[in-house]
Image (spheres, rainbow, N blue to C red):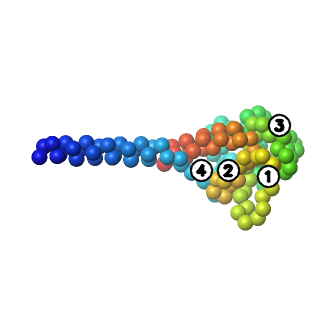
Amino acid sequence: MNRKRWTIGLLTLIVCGVAGWFLLHREVPVVFPTLEQAYVSIKQEGFLCVSDRVDGEIGAGFLVSREELTWAEVNSLVKAGPMGENWKGKVWVSYDSGRSLVIIPENAHARVWGNVLAFGDKDFLTEIDSALQRQTYRVL
C-alpha cells in the first residue's frame, strides 16, 4: 500500500514538473491593438523609435533602429522593391491592414503583432520580437 502511494506521488510530481516546464517555456504571442501601444512597448525595451511624421506623432507607422535617425532619414527608406543594405538594423512598424495588400520590400522578414505589422532586417526583428515576448511574459 505504501509503495503504491509513493508511485502515485512520484508520477504526480513528474507530471506537474513537465506541465510547469511547458508553461514556463511556451512562446507568448505579442499582440498590440494600436501602433501607439507598440511604440511605447518597443521603446520600453530600449529600442530607438522614430515616427513617420515631422511633429513626432505616429501617422502611418514608425521605424525602430539601433541608431538615432532623423525624420527625413526614416521617410527616405524605400519600403517597396528590393530591401537594400540600408535596412540593416532597421524595422518598420505600421498597422496590419488585414484585408488589403501590404507592400513590403523584397526579402524583408515580417511579423504580425495583433493589429500591427512589423517588417525589415530579420535578425533585428527577431531581437525585438524576443524582447517583446519577455515583456509580455512579465505582464502575465
Element on which disc 3 rests: helix
Percent position of residue 16, x then y: 33, 46
Q: Earlier in the sequence, mark 4 or mark 3?
A: 4
Using a 10 Å C-alpha cutoff, classify the residue at mark 4 as few (fewer than 14 neighbours), some (14 to 19) or many (20 or more): many
Quick check: 78 left or right of 108? Answer: right
At 65% from the left edge and 46% from the top edge, which residue is drawn? Answer: 40
The residue to which callout 4 is attached is 30
Tag 4: amino acid: Val
Relative placement, left or right, of 6 versus 74 is left
Residue that protrudes farthest toward the top in the picture: 67
- Spatial distance from mark 4 to mark 2, Cα to Cα? 9 Å
- Residue 104: which disc? 1
Mark 4 or mark 2, which is nearer to you?
2
Do callouts 4 and 2 mark residues in contact (Cβ within 8 Å)? yes
Mark 4 vs mark 1, CA separation in Å: 20 Å
Q: Is tag 1's residue or tag 2's residue first in the polypeptide sequence?
A: 1
Residue carrying label 3 = 85
Q: Secondary structure at mark 2?
A: strand
| Element marked by disc 4 | loop
Q: CA distance from mark 4 to mark 3?
A: 27 Å
User: Label 1 neighbourhood size at 10 Å, few (<14), some (14-19), many (20+)?
Assistant: some
**Residue type beneath disc 2:** Arg
Amino acid on which disc 3 is placed: Glu
Contact flag, marks 4 and 1 (Cβ < 8 Å): no
Q: Earlier in the sequence, mark 3 or mark 1?
A: 3
Question: Which residue is identified by label 2?
Answer: 111
Q: Nearer the viewer, residue 71 or 104?
A: 104
Whichever of callouts 4 and 1 sits on the residue coming sooner in the sequence is 4
Q: Residues within 10 Å of mark 3 (few under 14, many from 20)?
A: few
